[in-house]
Image (cartoon, coloured by chain):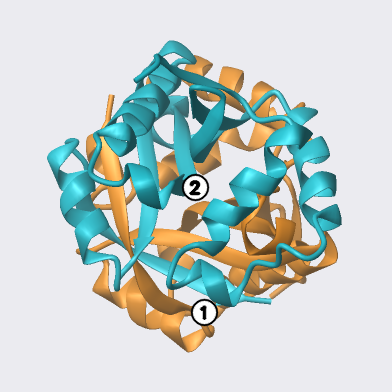
Chain colours: A cyan, B orange
Amino acid sequence: MGDLEIRAATAEDLPAIVAMLADDPLGAQRESLDDLTPYETALERLAADPNQHVVVAVRDGRVIGTLQLTIIPGLSHKGATRALIEAVRIHTDERGSGLGSRLIEWAIDTARRLGCRMVQLTSDKTRTDAHRFYARLGFTASHEGFKLSL
Amino acid sequence: MGDLEIRAATAEDLPAIVAMLADDPLGAQRESLDDLTPYETALERLAADPNQHVVVAVRDGRVIGTLQLTIIPGLSHKGATRALIEAVRIHTDERGSGLGSRLIEWAIDTARRLGCRMVQLTSDKTRTDAHRFYARLGFTASHEGFKLSL
């Protein structure tokens, strides 16, 4: 098994990324592999934003994981910067391999290196396995996560 | 009672903003009015970022509310942009006046105008009054909110 690389996502990675976003009980309802144009547009916007870090985990030339890390300056907590993790996905074949931990640890290390004082994320209440996973990595489920669709 | 104005926060608003951030059971433990320098530095960074909207609500020249809205592009949900609300504070004298709803509705309207498909926020599990407030405004507590201090 080759080394794992975690690097910025490029347009060439989008088919693999979108396939992972869709290969999920919740994601299957809301993603579309038929037309990648909206994903390409979004990735261009993300790549131009220095506070955005969309990465892929690659092994032996194959994209097997992804997440988005957003760096968010703020006033509260004495002007603390925080980091938000979104869109964490691990390829089906790689689940249980420790890759999820590697990706989240990359996000935590990157957040720390960029001066963040906190890392936060929300996880759908139905994803109970994910909740145990984040608790093992040191996260505390201290907050309610509210969403409003527009 | 004069009209309410919601506008971008400036350095001159910081003493009032920080006083509101500190005037709270959770905020009292983590804010400091003695030295505004870290808040000034953070506000400069926020003001330079087109995806950041730190606003104050002002009536009769007095700052009576604040929140931070962050616009976050993303790949999931077919390249949907989302908005994150943080650091919502209402002056003690104004609680129960409907100002909180006005501020959150401003955030929702701004998010919609900027093309967001979702608005999200987390609220400490001890803030049960806030949870009822967000539910009344249409938010769903669908997610667990995880935090990790660095």
Q: Chain of mark 1?
A: B
- Circle 2 crowding by C-alpha within 10 Å: few under 14, some 14–19, many from 20: some
Residue B23's label in the rendered image is: none
- Quadrant for residue B14, please give it: top right
Which numbered circle lies on residue A86?
A: 2
Q: Residue at x 36, y 47 (%)?
A: A93
As rendered, which of A91 and B62 lies closer to the eye?
Answer: A91
Q: Position of residue B120 (x, y in %)?
A: 53, 63
Marks 1 and 2 in Cβ contact (< 8 Å): no
Chain of the residue where label 2 is placed in the rendered structure: A
> In the image, residue B118 lies at what x, y percent?
63, 67
Q: Residue type at mark 2?
A: Glu
Task: Name above or below for residue B33 compared with residue A42.
Answer: above
Give the percent coordinates (x, y) of residue A116: 42, 23
Report x, y in % for residue B46: 67, 31
Image position of A20 (left or right of B24): right
Q: Quadrant of residue A45?
A: top right
Residue tagged 1: B97
Kindly report which numbered mark, 1 or 2, lies closer to the viewer in this rendering: 2
| Residue drawn at the location 32% of the way across and 27% of the way down | A102
Q: Residue at x 47, y 40 (%)?
A: A84
Residue A129 located left or right of residue A16: left
Label 1 in the same subunit as label 2: no
Task: Determine if residue B45 is in view.
Answer: yes
Q: Secondary structure at mark 2?
A: strand
